[in-house]
Amino acid sequence: MIKSSVVIRTTPLLSIETDHLIFHLPRTEDIPQMLEMSTDPSLAENALTQVDFTPASMAAMLANLPDPPTPQLTFFGLYLRKDPARLFGVSTLGRLPGDTRSRLSLWIRPCHRRQRPFGDIIPAMLEFAFRYLRLKEVEANSFAHQPMSPRVLHRYGFKDHGERMGYAPATGVTAPLLVMRMSRAAWFGTHRQHCVRLQPVPANRPLPAMQQQHAQRHRPSLV
């Protein structure tokens, strides 16, 4: 396991910094890159919510994202540190109706699949879930025809918790969902030390100018 630094910043912009990525709310200028993700058929086929990939719907979605993030919905764009205008993918924590736990999901642009920055995403999202959102447990789901997802999640310490039925609106298919969970106690007690390098990058490192333009609103303090 290759470790990464994970720094949660609350000013001037709520963000997460890792060795290779910067996480923050997506911007309207990122919509073309987000629309490119719709060329990946697995995105729509495996999504548990209806995804409408049009410029207008994406703009409306971005305008309605909670800021600051909440356990009901946390939505981060993932940007390369070496090229902050370039979207690597997106990652979310969210709850569907009836959920009692926030579900972790992530989608990587096809052009960035199997690249090293991918390894920073799950540790960073777990750090945010447990340190900032103060969640007690995080869930991740995978349809049975997605064998790579469980293997990746198990590497970071997720444990299997059976199956439940899941509905994919894009295909109209109801199929078994594998249920995997990570608890706050297990993350801090065991798995964090294997995933997170505890000599982080300097927290006062200035953000690139493009990110600073989106730091006008108040951000709560990290406690």
Image (cartoon, grey):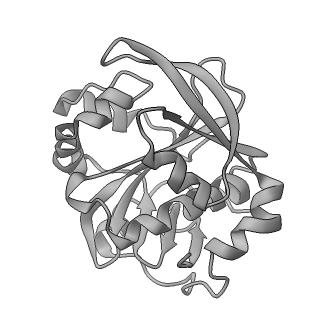
| Image vertical order of residue 64 relative to residue 176, above or below | below
Counting every numbered tag in the picture gives 0
In which quadrant of the rendered view does residue 114 lie? bottom left
Nearest the camera: 68 or 91?
A: 91
In which quadrant of the rendered view does residue 190 lie? bottom right
Left or right of 86: which side holds 139? right
Nearest the camera: 137 or 155?
A: 155
In which quadrant of the rendered view does residue 98 lie? top right
Left or right of 180: which side holds 1? left
Q: Position of residue 186 (x, y in %)?
A: 79, 58
Q: Residue at x 24, y 45 (%)?
A: 34
Q: Residue at x 16, y 46 (%)?
A: 32
Q: Residue at x 31, y 74 (%)?
A: 209
Q: Position of residue 37 (x, y in %)?
A: 23, 44
Left or right of 65: which side holds 159? right
Task: Examine the rendering and report whether any part of residue 57 can be seen.
Answer: yes
Q: Residue at x 54, y 59 (%)?
A: 122
Q: Position of residue 15 (x, y in %)?
A: 50, 63
Q: Position of residue 169 (x, y in %)?
A: 37, 16
| Image vertical order of residue 141 relative to residue 170, above or below | below
Task: Examine the rendering and report whether any part of residue 75 can be seen.
Answer: no
Left or right of 32: which side holds 109? right
**Quadrant in the picture for the N terminus:** bottom right
| Image vertical order of residue 29 relative to residue 42, above or below | below
**Quadrant in the picture for the C terminus:** bottom right
